[in-house]
Image (tube, helix red, strand yellow):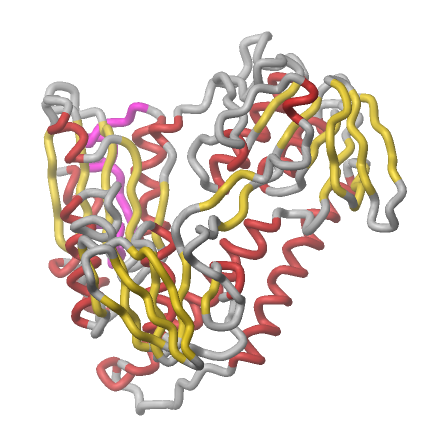
Amino acid sequence: MVIIGGGPAGHSCASTAARLGADVVVIERDTIGGAAHLWDCIPSKAMIATGNARQFLRRSARMGLAEVGSDVDLDQLRDRLKHIESRLETTVRGLLDSQRVELVDGFGRMVDARTVVATLPDGTERTFHADVVVLSTGSRPRIPEWAPADGERVLSTRDAYPPSVMPEHVIVIGSGVTGVEFVHMFESMGAQVTLVVSRQQVLPQKDPEVAAALEEDFLRRGVKLFKGARAESIVREGNEVIVSCDDGRIARGSHALLAIGSVPNSDGLCLDDVGVQTDHGYVPVNNHMQSNIPHIYAAGDLSGRLPLSSVATMQGRKIAEHAMGLTARGNGRQIDYDKAASAIFTEPEIADVGLAEIDAFAEGRKVRVTKVPFATHAKALINDDPRGFVKIISDPATGVILGGSIVGRHAAELISVLAVAATNGLTVTDIHESMLVHPTLAEALTEAAE
């Protein structure tokens, strides 16, 4: 097996395949563990953790503590991010080395359906003949032509972990998951923030009640929302950045940050020459992550499925199991993407899984919706953070949990309970009959189930 790309999908596939007896080669041009994972996901969450700590210190008096200083030291933060990245990469490399996976530092491309060539940093090439090829090269931030990202004042997401200087006023363009996380992160570190929202709500793909809770918190914190405005040009004038929108509104700030999606890293793989079908750069796959050529698989962002590290990791494992014959022997089950839990690391956190209330109503589907606010629970009061709620979507006839949403502290952790329930067909009774720890936020789950 030859794997091009050592991110969550690639290294998960490599580890599982090696454990099942395959000879595995992983070709990676950047970071084992995944450039998008270790340059985007992990640094952003580490910076959010720093911002959250600063926010906590700012309200420490309410917790019975004397107020302490909370200025952000960018140099120290930068060192912290590098340390985390290095430690995680070392861990992944150590695991693959222990399994005798061959790691090749280079850029991989296909020359025929069973031959992969790796161009090494010194310009030399190595050729590998494969029974199975796995494409898991990830994606990169989308930069439109009207947005001259210079890495100094007009930033892509990868220019901001952390930026060279802390922005005084940052204009975030894009109100999806990445955009709202940047709003929270920069505001929590002391910057003024304007968010350009092309729709009439932030997080346009999410439950409106969830989006409204986040908008309310942003407005309380002084974030300016340009709703129903689509950015169409960015002009830099000295140390000022001017963003013009299609409705005539103009936002002025010290920096602009682009959070408007990503594009797949399929260029240079020579897929067209080999006959691998693509769709706008993505590789369409079946339920086993096979491309139109059965022994060539695609996973992670490149597959065009849910762009989540957890999904990529599961895809990688499932590819290895299928390629090694476990699926044919009846072991394992296919991925149900509708049951993938996701989270947004704002404050309050947002997490959801499975069927959403708005989608159920749009489909005319009968569901039971139960909602419990955290404000009624002791742990939320102990944490001095009563924001948010738990919402469970269930089948009114059987009680089977179909999905749910959580807004509040530790939502990303709490959603795991509903994810396990939705994936395995558990009922609200199964949750209600579980005896959870008191006092915890998780008790809101049992109350909503009741």
Is residue 440 on the magenta stretch? yes
Count of numbered circles in the view: 0
Left or right of 205 in this view: 361: left
Residue 416 drawn at (x, y percent): 36, 42
**Residue that appears at 26% across and 38% down:** 434
Along the viewing direction, whichever of 440 and 81 lies nearer the viewer = 81
Q: Position of residue 63 (x, y in %)?
A: 26, 80
- Of 393 and 45, the residue lying toward us: 45
Q: Which is the main secondary structure of the residues drawn in magenta?
A: loop
Q: Residue furthest top?
A: 329
- Image quadrant holding the C terminus, namely top left
Camera-nearest residue between 18 and 288: 288
Q: Is residue 47 above or below residue 374?
A: below
| Residue 124 in the figure: left or right of residue 357 | right
Q: Is residue 388 left or right of residue 82?
A: left
- Residue 410 seen in the figure: no
Q: Which residues are magenta?
A: 425-443
* Image quadrant occupied by the N terminus: top right
> Is residue 85 among the parts visible in the rendering?
yes
Which residue does the image show at 66% across and 60% down from the upper left?
A: 87
Question: Residue visible at 75% across and 41% down?
Answer: 107
61 in magenta: no
The quadrant holding residue 103 is: top right
Q: Nearer the viewer, residue 272 or 137?
A: 272
Residue 225, given in percent of the width and then of the height, sits at 20, 64
Q: Quadrant of residue 95?
A: top right
